[in-house]
């Protein structure tokens, strides 16, 4: 039995400018014990898919299951097996951290949970904030509490929607150590993030969503193999030669050119030399998940010719 199963999930929102299709026939399974990454640009439909899984939104068609329980017809069972860290910072300002975690335990019918609550507080660097009021916490600390809240009933399936947005380096590391430990103990993890190096390091399999459709679904190692194997990276002060246009990833002065082999790199260098350009800090690196992501997102892999929802069409 898969930990998570999406079966032809579609979701259309009503918007002032007409219907907006946020999800278009999404189907895939996540096996028990997997550390699975769900990636995609802003508005691709990641949070919508997670909301459907958590029973917070209804699919227009299709269904979602958690460990065999349908999230709609068997809501309570499904919800119990799931711990969701939401993307939005939602919290009750009247409670202390410990109270919030006790209340959440009560919601799931878990009694005498203080030992686990203490472990969560300790593991997430919140031990000294246990008696602080939620509204006294910084943004990053509130996010830690959301993680603790999601885990309070020790759910077998853990879903994290951008858990590291706005979180400092130290906590990112603490958080990943803790989540990786839970994953080793058998918990299934579904993660969305825009930090692709995190996804590359943690996830054994990755799905990419684009405009509500799955455009890639593979083992991370396979995805990495599919990319151009090397990237030539350098800094430049002058405009880019026309030959590089459409090929290069440009961030300020930094130019990155995907290359399949040594010949291609030589060719690029020849172009630079012939143009008489001054480049600095030249290096060649292995392609990473960000290169693959850009590749996949820029390719038109859409099989079906449907009007894809775009950010422009979204209600503000
Ligand atoms: N409640 C809603 N009503 C109308 N449209 C919505 C609603 N929720 C989401 N959408 C739209 O659905 C699309 C998908 O949004 P979603 O939040 O799932 O994207 P996402 O992949 O999570 O993006 P991000 O990376 O920015 O979090 C967007 O176009 C968004 O505007
Ligand atoms: Mg989102």
Image (cartoon, rainbow, N blue to C red):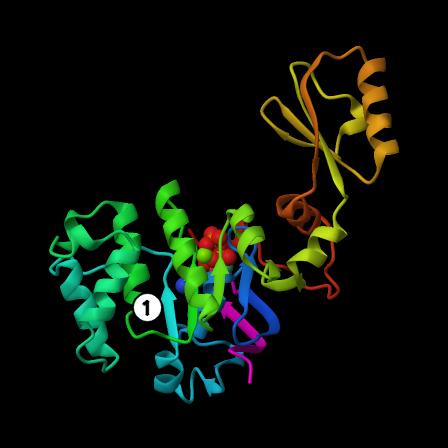
How far across and down, in percent of the image, does residue 171 sit? 35, 47
| Residue occupying the far bottom of the picture | 73
How far across and down, in percent of the image, does residue 305 sit? 73, 63
Can residue 183 be found in the magenta stretch?
Answer: no
What residue do we see at 23% from left, 45% from top?
138
What residue do we see at 16% from left, 51% from top?
128
**Ligand 2 is within 8 Å of the C-beta of the residue at disc 1:** no
| Secondary structure category for the residue under label 1 | helix
Q: Quadrant of residue 232?
A: top right
How far across and down, in percent of the image, does residue 60 sit? 51, 77
How far across and down, in percent of the image, does residue 254 sit? 62, 25
Residue 15 seen from this side: no
Residue 184 seen from this side: yes
Q: Quadrant of residue 107?
A: bottom left
- In the visual, does 39 lie left or right of 173? right
What residue do we see at 36% from left, 61% from top?
86
- In the visual, does 3 lie left or right of 92? right
Location of the N terminus (image quadrant) = bottom right
Report which residue position mark 1 lands on: 151
What residue do we see at 66% from left, 50% from top?
297
The answer to which of 147 and 15 lies nearer the viewer is 147
The answer to which of 90 and 231 lies nearer the viewer is 231
Q: How many marks?
A: 1
Q: Is 269 drawn above or below residue 60 in the view shown?
A: above
Residues shaded magenta? 1-21
- Characterize the local packing of mark 1: few (<14), some (14-19) or many (20 or more) Cα atoms within 10 angstroms: many
- In the visual, does 277 lie left or right of 27? right
């Amino acid at each position: 039995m898969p930990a998570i199963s999406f079966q032809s999930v579609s979701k259309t929102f009503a918007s002032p400018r007409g219907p907006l299709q946020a999800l278009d026939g999404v189907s895939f399974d996540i096996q028990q014990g997997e550390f699975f990454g769900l990636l995609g640009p802003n508005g691709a439909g990641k949070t919508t898919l997670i909301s459907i899984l958590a029973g917070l939104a209804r699919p227009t068609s299709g269904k979602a299951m958690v460990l065999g329980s349908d999230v709609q017809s068997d809501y309570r069972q499904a919800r119990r097996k799931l711990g969701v860290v939401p993307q939005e910072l939602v919290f009750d300002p009247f409670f202390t951290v410990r109270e919030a975690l006790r209340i959440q335990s009560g919601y799931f019918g878990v009694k005498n949970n203080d030992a686990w609550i203490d472990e969560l507080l300790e593991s997430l660097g919140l031990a000294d904030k246990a008696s602080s009021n939620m509204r006294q916490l910084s943004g990053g600390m509130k996010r830690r509490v959301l993680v603790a809240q999601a885990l309070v009933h020790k759910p077998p399936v853990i879903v994290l929607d951008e858990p590291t947005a706005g979180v400092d380096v130290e906590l990112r590391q603490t958080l990943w150590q803790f989540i990786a430990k839970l994953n080793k103990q058998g918990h299934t993890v579904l993660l969305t993030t825009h930090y692709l190096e995190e996804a590359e390091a943690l996830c054994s399999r990755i799905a990419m969503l684009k405009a509500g459709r799955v455009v890639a679904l593979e083992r991370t190692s396979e995805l990495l193999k599919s990319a151009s194997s090397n990237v030539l990276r350098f800094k430049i002060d002058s405009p880019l030669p026309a030959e590089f246009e459409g090929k290069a990833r440009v961030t300020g002065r930094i130019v990155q050119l995907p290359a399949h082999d040594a010949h291609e790199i030589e060719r690029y260098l020849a172009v630079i030399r012939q143009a008489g350009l001054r480049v600095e800090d030249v290096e060649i690196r292995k392609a990473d998940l960000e290169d693959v992501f850009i590749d996949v997102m820029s390719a038109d892999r859409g099989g079906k010719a449907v009007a894809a929802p775009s950010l422009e069409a979204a209600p503000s």
